[in-house]
Amino acid sequence: MDGRAIRWGVLGAGGIAGTVAVDIAATPGNVLHAVASRDADRAAAFAAAYDVRCSYGSYTDMLADADVDVVYIATTHAQHHEHALLALRSGKPVLVEKAFTLNARQAREVVAEARARELFCMEAMWTRLNPLIRQAVAIAASGEIGDVLGVRTDLSKLFPYDPAHRLYDLAAGGGALLDLGVYPVTVAWMFLGRPDAVQALGTLAPTGADVTVSQQWHYDRGPVAQLYCSAAGPSPFGGLINGSDGWISIEPRLHRPQQLVVQRGTQHEVIEAPPVSGNGYTLEVEEVERCLREGRTESEHIPLDETVAILDVLDEVRRQLGVHYPADEE
């Protein structure tokens, strides 16, 4: 790809689409070229609000636009699979909002399509790109806190119960696990990798969506991980990596931490987060741009095989909780 600006198409015109669109527009070398919604008026309003060049009342019409270089999939969880495949089959690279898909089967299909067509594909998991999280992983890997014995992670937020809200609607891919829990899972995975055994407990809403989920991960080599998420109320806790000679505390919120507190033996250090521009999604936009300009079909920082493997684990967690999506039966 030459030195011209990367031209983005935004598929979906909801809240997250607008939040990320601001950061796309503010990232040098990237422009908002098009937006699509099934409601043409909504797409036009979005285009006017965010200074997008073109608006479409049809996803297929936007995907036929030859000037769209990459598509950001910003629809609800339950639609990611369909829309990612639609974009890839139109020859467009994709950035897919988390959770990547509802389950591992869907994820494998999207990844297989991207690889067969040699098109870029990435989950929009910004925490994997966060400088503090990456620094914490590097510190743990260096042995500075000794052997990693365990990881504790949490991301919780109050979503008042409303059966019509997407978080409580199974048809929309609702549940705290896919909305909030993907962050504790991803961070624990970055330190310890795939667990050898998983145990899960939780509570369900009247709709059948998970509200609170507690997971215990076990590793045959010794470490354990405790992961928690809840839509029933907030929590200030982020993450803690326990080592045999120290610890790393990720504070205060796991998905967008402000500092690390590192204890190396008797040495105590506080590492503050570097400034992050805009709404924090610039890191994703820059990573997509880098990969496209270098001709990469995936990011080594957000590998597709791990995206699929994490959903494998989440499938098992949901199985233990008794949370079933209509798409699981397809």
Image (cartoon, rainbow, N blue to C red):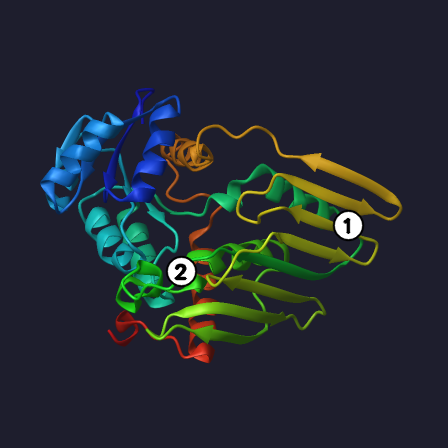
Quick one: 36 or 157, which is closer to the camera?
A: 157
Q: Which residue is mark 1?
A: 143
User: Going 76% across and 44% down the picture, which residue do you hit?
Assistant: 262
Q: Secondary structure at mark 2?
A: loop
Identified by mark 2, the residue type is Pro
Q: Is residue 232 above or below residue 239?
A: below
Quick one: 145 or 208, which is closer to the camera?
A: 208
User: Hey, which quadrant is residue 151 in on the image?
Assistant: bottom right
N-term-proximal mark, 1 vs 2: 1
Find residue 37 and report its horizontal and vertical position in percent: 16, 44
Look at the image and tell me in which quarter the N terminus lies. Answer: top left
User: Hey, which quadrant is residue 64 in on the image?
Assistant: top left
Q: Which residue is mark 2?
A: 160
Identified by mark 1, the residue type is Gly
User: Going 77% across and 50% down the picture, which residue do you hit?
Assistant: 143
> Distance from label 1 to label 2 (Cα)?
42 Å
Quick one: 303 or 243, which is closer to the camera?
A: 243
Find residue 213 and report its horizontal and vertical position in percent: 51, 69
